[in-house]
Amino acid sequence: MAFGGASLALAALVLVSCASAVVATQYTVGDTSGWTTGTDYTTWASDKKFKVGDKLVFKYAGAAHTVDEVSASDYAACSSSKVLSSDSTGTTTVTLKTAGKHYFICGVTGHCSGGMKLVVNVAAASAAPAPAPAPTPAADTPDAPDTTPTTKTPSSASSSDATPKSPATAEVTPRAKESSTSGATGLRAAAWAGLALAGLVAMF
């Protein structure tokens, strides 16, 4: 929930920043005096910061004056022979679309030389700040696997299995008994043979 609230607050801050960067300012030329003779428009414009997107509103008596946008040279000469735009409806709104200086005069004869002329220096609109990236929640770090090798201790049973068996004594004993029996049998046979030979000698 805390993370969601922080994201909403950040989004709101970005929207407010963007809105403040694109909101245009509307200026009424001459303020309450409007667009007329006898007003110092150089002083009126001196403390204002015009930027691209701002609007100038000229208020005057319709058909009594004009609002002509002209070049720098025609502004200096108070000439409206090559106007960039012109209006005489009584309320003229001009949107400042490009940076740099914009020049305006009244095209009625004698009015420009009488002070109905205005130059505004327009600055480029400030770029909206790039939105800050949303914080990324920290990912859970998996536990590192245990890489310590496990040493197995051989059990006593395994040790006994690994020890080679010595030849069983029981396998040798029958053979020894068999050899003793064979020797006794041979002695008996020799004794009988000796007795038989002695008998034959006695007979002769």
Image: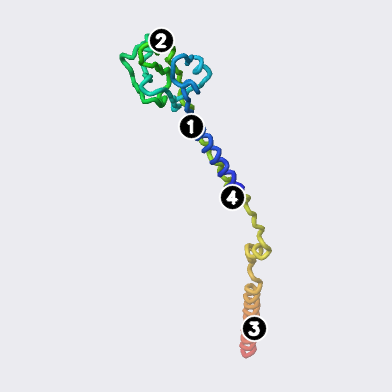
Q: Which mark is residue 188?
A: 3
Density class for disc 1 (Cα within 10 Å; few <14, some 14-19, many ≥20) is few
Alpha-carbon span between mark 4 and mark 1: 49 Å
Residue at 46% in and 26% down: 125
Which residue is the site of mark 1? 23
Task: Please state which amino acid type lies under the numbered disc 1.
Answer: Val
Residue 181, horizontal then vertical, whole percent: 64, 80
Side of 26 relative to 192 (left or right): left
Q: Are marks 2 and 3 in contact (CB under 8 Å)?
A: no
Going from the N terminus, do you reach mark 4 or mark 1 first? 1
Which residue is the site of mark 4? 142
Q: Are marks 3 and 4 in contact (CB under 8 Å)?
A: no
* Viewer-nearest of discs 4 and 1: 1
Residue farthest to the left?
Answer: 81
Q: Secondary structure at mark 3?
A: helix
* Viewer-nearest of discs 1 and 3: 1
* Viewer-nearest of discs 3 and 4: 4
Which residue is the site of mark 2? 113
Alpha-carbon span between mark 2 and mark 1: 35 Å
Side of 96 relative to 44 (left or right): left
Q: Are marks 4 and 2 in contact (CB under 8 Å)?
A: no
Residue 173, horizontal then vertical, whole percent: 65, 75
* Viewer-nearest of discs 2 and 3: 2
The foreground one among 169 and 69 is 69
As drawn, 142 above or below 62 = below
Density class for disc 4 (Cα within 10 Å; few <14, some 14-19, many ≥20) is few
